[in-house]
Amino acid sequence: MNDVWIVCVAEVRRRLRSRAYQIGVVVGMLGIAVMIRLPAMLQARVAEDQTRIAIAGPPELTAPVASALRGTYTIVAVLGPRGRPTVQTLHRLHVTRLLALAPARRSFAATLYVSSTQNPNVASLQRDLGPLNLALTSNFPLETTRRLLAVPIAVVGVGDTFATPASATVAHALAFGLLFVLYLVVILNSQLTLNSVIEEKTNRIAELLVAAIDPLALLYGKIGAGTVLATVQLVAWLLAAMLSGVGLAEGSAMIHGGAALGGVLHDAIKPLVIPGFLFLLFLGLLQFSTMYAAIGSLVSRPEELGSIASALILPIFVAFVTAFVALDAPDTPFVVVASFVPLIAPFVMFVRIAVGATPLWQFLLSGTINLAFLAFVAIAAGRLYRVGMLLYGRPPSLRQIWSTIRG
Amino acid sequence: MDALVADGLRKEFGKVVAVRDVTFAVAPGQTLGLIGPNGAGKTTTMRMILGVLVPDGGRIVWQGRVVDASMRHRFGYLPEERGLYGRMDVREHVEYFARLHGLGDRDARRRADEWLERLDVAQYAARPCGELSKGNQQKVQIACAAVHAPELLVLDEPFSGLDPVNAEMLAGVVRELHARGTALVLSSHQMWQLEQLCDCYCIVSGGESRATGTLQELRRRIPVRVLRIDPVTDAVRSVLAGVAGARAVDSGDGVAFEVPVETDVGKLLRRLAPVAEIARFEALEPSLREIYLATVGESVA
């Protein structure tokens, strides 16, 4: 145990000095801050573009239309009747849309000229102008038509997942963000463990080390170091996320019809999510880094790594893609099955517990299966590592690897 | 009691038998030279001694006990192909290996500093190993192998790649450790260096130990002695022709004579003196190199 500790401490020091780790932590912090801030900034910018509008037409139409749209839109200019505008006209007016009105049988006809047809957002205009159109056509007062067209629809969740749409949105956003963190922590730290093993093999330090201590102590020391550094990384990233999110949280303290943020968060973050995230993160990290270390021990030269890179990336890629599917459909049979499969489960099960109605027994069963798999990987990796660290020259065949794993 | 005993060691890698039957013993504080051609099984034997490889047959005994993992901390190793962590500081590197061999933090640091001082690399203690010259890196590797004052130090081709100054420095370290009572096993192709450093030898060829013992004991295996006589006149040839089993051989720098080991050299000199004017008469004991060549050649034949 003492040997594992000595290796772990030395490994932590060594990796803390590595550029890959330092850059990973800092870039990750910046990336998370950008990921949190950027959507809000872009959304604000897009929303601003879409709510600025110019109106053109006879005054008897532009006046009531401007009045109907005011509140939702910023009316930048009210122009007289005119033909089809050019894009330069829109640029000159600093708008992306111009609504041209013309009289038509007791009401009006509207044409929306947009600088890009990609997202014209006509539905919103239709919604806002609908009461005016009905009022002009039917001679009902505008207030009456507004009341008639605003059909009250209450949204009530009947499943046991989230009580409100706001909670569901927050839960999905959180699951999405934490899934990224989970993925990055696992892949970066497993990669660092792999690099460390390959460095020792190619530098020929391996022989010196295994002459001094049991190769298993070396392996577990490395994996322990990876876990410690992943924790440091995780804390740094979560700190960055919290600091970046403070302003946003305050800004959106009231979400969807006045629901208090505290209540929304309480509903969105189920009790199992945080402990489940930590458990699954370390489970995934241990599974992948143990596997990567064993595979790294079979590599004699860094250039050999290219041939096995796909084998290393494939499971993590499949896990990530499946987890994305799970964000939208957390309880479909395919996703449920995937949430038990080792290597994939840490990602998929996390999404399921964050956004789905996952029974506790499924989480526990998946955890047990994956812990058993981890034990198998640890034993198999130990056997491979013990042999692999002194293996130079031609890489072993799959048959030789299997026979080594079987002991 | 011998400190280290390798008894009938065998190691196979698939269908290849790397070590077939290697046996030798090292007395406490002695230095053993493990000699053999490339691929003879020396490195595999050393790896088995250190527990890096598990023997398929035979046993290794240290101070009367079969070697197990718990004894590894008491051994030191300098492999033939060796490396360092490029980004780790020199002192930290040596300390790390000291700690891996069971030393506490304080002891590890003190001993690391002592060895860096001893090997004249103390000024680089705070520099990353990767920034050192090759010669200084080799010194750091030596410090890593010896920092924990091992009871047994195994050195695999320690002189390969060293310049004469560093080779002499390493030889000094070996002598110092020998004087402190450390048992040493070292392999080298530099026979003259081994002759200076070793108390006993094991000649390995084809995975088997062909000869073991001190230089004197090994010499007894060679049935002839070489006589250098100068000048070689007809009279000298005539006297030597009368010695049973004597024959002229080319010694590289002239003619020499091989005579059976039991030949009374003094008597031969007394017979030569009246008939020839002898400027040089020298009876040479076989060198380690000659013994090695004879033994390995014999085994190959």
Image (spheres, grey):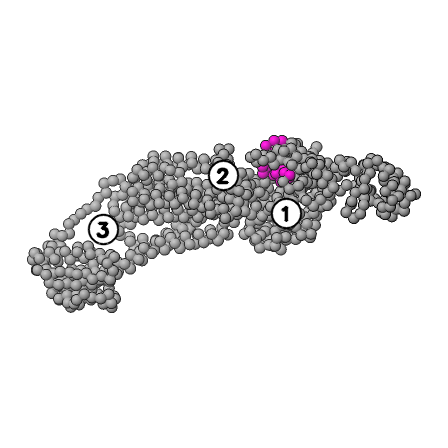
The answer to whether residue B44 is magenta is yes
**Horizontal side of residue A25 vs B48, given as left or right:** left
Question: Residue A89 or A228: which is nearer the viewer?
Answer: A89
Q: Which residue sits at x=42%, y=36%?
A: A373
Instruction: Give the amino acid at mark 2.
Output: Ser
Question: Residue B142 or A17: which is nearer the viewer?
Answer: B142
Chain label for disc 2: A
Q: Distance from label 3 to label 2 (Cα)? A: 63 Å
Question: Residue A381 in the image: x percent, y percent?
Answer: 48, 38
Instruction: Give the amino acid at mark 1.
Output: Ile
Chain label for disc 1: B
**Horizontal side of residue A387 vs A262, given as left or right:** right
Q: Distance from label 1 to label 2 (Cα)? A: 36 Å
Question: Which label belongs to residue A257?
Answer: 3
Question: Residue A310 in the image: x percent, y percent?
Answer: 43, 45
**Circle 2 residue:** A397
Q: Residue furthest left?
A: A139
Mark 3 or mark 2, whichever is nearer to me? 2
**Circle 1 residue:** B142
Q: Residue furthest right?
A: B274
Q: Which residue sits at x=45%, y=54%?
A: A23
**SS of the residue under disc 2:** loop
